[in-house]
Amino acid sequence: MASTATVHQTKWWSGGKSPFNLEYGKLMMWYFLMSDAFTFGAFLISYGTVRFSQNFWPDPNVVFNAFPGAGHANLPLAFVSVMTFILIISSVTMVLAVHAGHNNDKKGVVKWLFWTIIGGLAFLSCQAWEWTHLLTGEHAALVNGHIELLPQTTSINPWGPLVDHSVAIDALKNSTPQVIARLVHEHDASHSLPHLLSLPKEELLGMVNTAELHVRQTGPVAFGGYFFGITGFHGFHVFSGVIINIIMLIMTQKDVFARRGHYLMIEKAGLYWHFVDLVWVFVFLCFYLI
Amino acid sequence: MSNEANLHGHTEVVTTHPVHHDEHHVHHHKETFVTKYIFSQDHKMIARQFLITGIIWAIIGGLFSVLFRLQLGYPEQSFPILETFFGRWAAGGKIVPEFYYALVTMHGTILVFFVLTAGLSGTFANLLIPFQIGARDMASPFLNMLSYWFFFLASIVMMSSLFIETGPAAGGWTMYPPLSAVRQASLGSKLGSDLWLVSMALFIVSSLLGGLNYISTILNMRTKGMSMTRMPLTMWAIFFTAVLGVLSFPVLLSGAILLLFDRNLGTSFYLSDIVVNGEILSNEGGSAILYQHLFWFLGHPEVYIILLPAMGMVSEILSVNSRKPIFGYMAMVGSLFAICILAFLVWAHHMFVTGLNPFLGAFFVLLTLLIAVPSAIKVFNWLTTLWRGNIRFTPATLFAIGFVSLFISGGLTGIFLGNSTIDIHLHDTMFVVAHFHIVMGVASFFGMFAGVYHWFPKMFARYLNNTLGYIHFWVTIIGSYLIFWPMHYQGLAGIPRRYLDKRAWASFNQFADLDKMITVVSIIVFAVQLMFVFNFFYSIFKGRKVRTQNPWKANTLEWTTPIVAGHGNWEGEIPEVHRWAYDYGKDGRDFIPQTEPIGENESKDH
Amino acid sequence: MEQQLMSPEMTFQHHTDDAEFKRRVRKTTILLSVITIFELAIGLTIYTIHKGENPSHLLVLMFKGMVCILTLAKAYYIVSVFMHLGDEIRNMIMTIVVPLMLFIWFITAFLIDGNSYKNLRNKYDSHFRESTSVEHKPAAKE
């Protein structure tokens, strides 16, 4: 069978056969992925367009510098590199699953699909943590002459340019005791928050470590919209990929493909999964690296 | 062993859907009403579903244009009957502004997307692809069925938006933000716009499922001997249409999703510095121009998604009915390809006056004007195909010739508009309305009518009534020119499009009578379309029966199937193809079907 | 004829032997990892440049360009090896690669116009200019 490819070599387009030696399902999957590439492309290009139309754009190393369990340590790019490697590894396991399918090796397919699903779930969990971290974060930002503690959401961006030190000190004086108490707590957890909140504002002001006080202006809100929009859309693809893989796993277990005599479906699911990885490569580039 | 074993997609269908396998071989037996007429996976039935849904939408969209033409032609008059039907939307018998904008918006949306995209390529791609390339059905009949039903869902959502309290979307068919993004901006920007966006998302899914199917079917499932360059031009046109759709609709999807986020999640992709009713919105930093870029990245290819199938069918019909080979087959294919590529590169010519960088604009002017080259090649080839032909003036031929005429007249004004400097004067005037209605709207309708008249015998095994067909053609072509030709003058004089009432400008009053004339003609033309719809449905049941397999004496494969083709199209094996589709009047023979092997002494010209 | 049960395309044409395949996958995995680590290094370099006195914009831009190229290399390996596009027939590869060329003009035109929108607003919208530009240089870095 393997030699058929050479038999027809000269007449690929003459009709009566696939010009690409592919069954239609795989062809459709490829073209669907291309079309999906344009969806993601449009998102990322929109992001680029808005970014190019701004005078200031937040530095990703400042925004994404947290790691689960590491507290306030400044670890730029650390967590996202973990996420990236998770996806690359899950892509590798998928390749192995597809290869096992080629060899009609049911056990291999099950094993590697299982690890791929685990990889997908791990990635999604990482993303969930990162989203939560951003959405519940508290970052000192200058708003109308005083400091507020703002999260990163779709409509708020606390990552503008750093404020001059003197301006920050003035703003600190205008801020509410609650905000000041939190600022103190953040740098020195030895004081409990309820205790700090009970102190008068004057005393709190004296406790703030002004040398470590970094206050920023609010930044371009589109940053959050695009970040959550695009990583969310990508996450949705990962999620549906995991679902597809689970279905494939069940079908393999039930010997559907074994009866069918081929594991072409695994191959198509694989294409989709690699595409998800491929998109992440570009999301990684656009949001975290540049 | 045979062709059928060779039809891979087909084999694949068999392996993946065992049920289907049965259907192929014992067709006619297991079909119930539901599987035959509703959730049908047969390409012929799906084509009919698309066509009839499209016709219903066309009536609604056409009616809307008649309503707003009443307002434009007779702004001072009130029509009590309107109040009877539309209540507070036409209080006192006069169309209220919100209603007018809703009508204009829905007219555009319905005709561009639901009629001329789904209704046109949905119908003829489904009908003709398996027939003309020689396949049992589409690559994936199941996805094909889904494609129709997603379109149906999109239709339901859009239709329901017509009946909600605040009315449908009313920000123009392009849905530009901020108007469409800010709820408090107008009535139509409330729920209507959400429904519009959801409907469009469903529509995009439908067109994607369809398009992927069309592409893989044409590539993968051609019968033996049907090389790409032996395909009828309809197939090439539909192929490029599908490519356009698959690559450009997702961009609109992205744009629509971002717009939905702006409307519902408080993001600021398109919004910045906005004050509505004295209230300053918190949205900041977005770019409304970005939406226009995204929209037109689809919007321009969309024009060709509408036009290319019409071009393909016209090429086929002109060749068949002038009993001559198509002139310049490869040039036709090449120009389709060129149009397909250029369609992606010119979107910003819709945006010259948005503050687009003039330097960038210059490139868009250049690329836009380049489209004139393949367009001219096509026109030249159609005319030379007709030249000295033995023309049979069937209604289909007339509509095809009408298409060429409209394509020329509308195309020429495109050269005006493609120049950024002239566009500053003409942008958003009636000139633009005239241009795109002639070249894209009416011309594509003509292509569609030509297709319906030509392939009606294949679809329903009966003929449409010819006399009604001739009336339909002559009234429509004359009416179209009477409606749209004067609009050029209005536009040159500076009358803006989409204005409810122009009486406040003394200089525009000179056109008051012209506007009345346009309105009257548009009512007549609309009535004639209703006559066509009557002809269509009447002929399905009572039309003259088709007695011969090949009523037009055409070469293509669909006429080798039985008059009423069953599921699977050919009884027995799929015929093999030995020649291109255009051997008319060759070696003294009127026509030589594609299935006939090349004779010993046959001359070599193709 | 050879196609009795299955159509010819059901042959898996990329029938390389197991060892050869495993070697290729391992090689690609290592390659992808190395490129990613390299990218991360560049990202951190950009970070330190930003932190230092008088960051050189040209240098940052150069590094960003390098990351873009590395990303394209990664994409190439994923598509060609993992997705087996490299093993397909040349025509098939072309139908995928050629339409992607549209991205060139897609990206160029969008970004140029985005940039031009910024310039327009800086020129005519003083509120925009003042509220978004980083005038007070000394505090602008961390």
Image: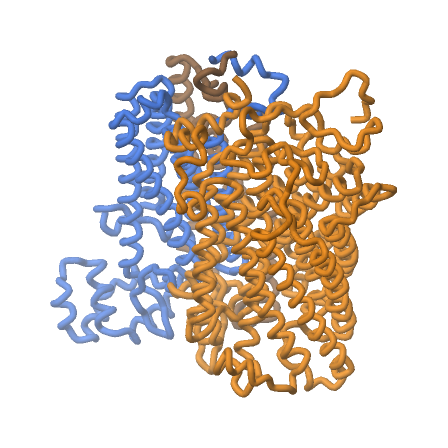
**Quadrant, the C terminus of chain C:** bottom left
Q: Residue at x 33, y 18 (%)?
A: A104
**Residue C70 visible in the picture:** no
B389 versus C135 height, above or below: above
Residue A154, how many percent across, how many down? 37, 61
Q: Which chain is blue?
A: A
Q: Is residue A248 left or right of residue B445?
A: left
Q: Residue at x 64, y 46 (%)?
A: B309
Rendered shade, chain C: brown
Residue A219, how many percent across, how many down? 42, 62
Q: Depth check: B338 or B391 in front? A: B391
Residue B78, how many percent across, how many down? 60, 86
Q: Residue at x 55, y 39 (%)?
A: B214
Rendered shade, chain B: orange
Q: Depth check: A11 or A214 in front? A: A11
A97 versus A74 height, above or below: above
